[in-house]
Image (cartoon, rainbow, N blue to C red):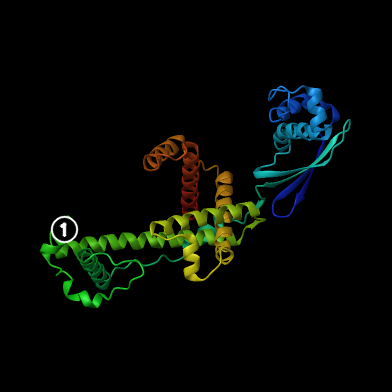
């Protein structure tokens, strides 16, 4: 089958081609059989209408259209393989010309993985890693704030949790705050006394601040790399990311006892306005995923089968109704992304 591939904006391609009259004839009998399954005519059992009667009832063009669609379902796979097209999403198929005894013309519009023009990501990552690291400090006030929060949480549990929408005046309950002494800290966990609690609180705060500093460093590396990347981002990837963002947000709202429409009423915004606000983040996330995947391809970074199996098994224990293949795909992506970021963090040492 001869086809012409034309590039379109936003990482789309248009495939123009013809299905020969001979090929249509090959699929004609199968098309009649398939269409006949749903035809009901008086005097005939369903699915047993004679071919000549079916052709008369349905019309030759309808049968040819079905035959063309059947041929394209098979040929489409061959076309994208032959032309090495990395298609994402469902294609849009249009039959542009069809007539008995003649070839059928078609157009297929499909979205492909975009071309990614990368900058010197190793150099950029190295420069970001050489920047002065944040100084990790935990003050006595930081620890005092943790203690105050623990006391307030204890007070809330003692007085009941406030209802959503109600603002509780904590000053009214100030006298109910428990005294922070050795006896109290022992009820909180494996703490010997106040000094022990403060020491462990400091260790936890240091680890927390280190993690936040690490996350900020990683974000700065990716942001710097993304600034030097050119991608004609497909709309389908942005829409997919927006759908995921909405699903996550609706799940969070549900846990708080709210619905998405109620939330929109509360903030006095339309769904279109929220989507517009989310769009830059969706674009950035889609772009980041493509860039990480491209670096993994270039550097041949692949998670091992053992890592994927171990993490997938662990995740399936928490989400027992999830589809195993989708879990594996998700885990593979997470592991690959983590390995790519770790690789970028290490390039300054190479």
Q: Residue furthest left?
A: 183
Q: Is residue 55 left or right of residue 121?
A: right
User: For the point 24% across and 78% down, which residue is it?
Assistant: 171
Question: Considering depth in this image, is 300 or 282 the residue closer to the camera?
Answer: 282
The residue that label 1 is drawn on is 191
Compared across the picture, whether 307 is left or right of 224 comes to: left
Residue 185 horizontal/vertical position (percent): 15, 62
Position of the N terminus by quadrant: top right
Residue 244 visible, this orientation: yes
Q: Quadrant of residue 45?
A: top right
Q: Tag 1's secondary structure? A: loop
- In the figure, residue 54 lies in which quadrant? top right
In the image as oriented, which residue stretches furthest toward the right?
A: 101
Depth check, front residue: 324 or 68: 68
Q: Is residue 61 above or below residue 122?
A: above
Pinpoint residue 151: horizontal percent, then vertical percent. Answer: 21, 68
Q: Residues within 10 Å of mark 1 (few under 14, many from 20)?
A: some
């Amino acid at each position: 089958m001869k086809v012409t591939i034309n590039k379109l904006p936003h990482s789309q391609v248009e495939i123009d081609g013809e299905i020969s009259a001979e090929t249509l004839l090959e699929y004609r009998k199968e098309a009649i059989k398939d269409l006949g399954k749903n035809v009901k005519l008086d005097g005939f059992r369903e699915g047993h209408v004679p071919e000549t009667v079916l052709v008369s009832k349905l019309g030759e063009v309808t049968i040819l259209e079905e035959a063309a669609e059947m041929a394209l379902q098979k040929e489409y796979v061959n076309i994208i393989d032959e032309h090495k097209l990395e298609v994402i999403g469902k294609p849009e198929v249009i039959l542009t010309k069809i007539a008995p005894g003649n070839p059928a013309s078609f157009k297929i519009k499909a979205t492909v993985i975009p071309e990614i023009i990368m900058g010197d990501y190793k150099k950029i990552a190295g420069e970001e890693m050489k920047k002065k690291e944040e100084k990790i400090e935990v003050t006595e006030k930081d620890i005092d704030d943790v203690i105050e929060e623990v006391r307030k949480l204890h007070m809330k549990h003692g007085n009941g949790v406030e209802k959503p929408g109600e603002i509780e005046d904590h000053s009214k309950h100030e006298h109910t705050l428990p005294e922070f002494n050795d006896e109290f800290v022992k009820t909180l966990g494996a703490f010997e006394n106040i000094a022990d609690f403060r020491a462990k609180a400091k260790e936890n705060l240091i680890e927390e601040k280190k993690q936040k500093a690490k996350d900020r460093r990683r974000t700065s590396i990716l942001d710097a790399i993304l600034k030097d990347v050119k991608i004609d981002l497909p709309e389908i990837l942005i829409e997919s990311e927006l759908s995921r963002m909405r699903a996550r947000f609706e799940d969070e709202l549900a846990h708080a006892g709210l619905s998405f429409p109620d939330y929109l009423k509360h903030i006095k915004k339309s769904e279109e306005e929220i989507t517009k606000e989310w769009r830059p983040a969706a674009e950035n996330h889609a772009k980041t995923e493509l860039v990480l995947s491209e670096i993994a391809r270039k550097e041949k970074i692949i998670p091992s089968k053992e890592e994927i199996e171990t993490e997938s098994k662990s995740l399936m224990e928490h989400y027992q109704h999830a589809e195993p293949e989708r879990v594996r795909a998700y885990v593979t992506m997470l592991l690959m992304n983590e390995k790519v970021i770790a690789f970028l963090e290490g390039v300054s040492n190479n």
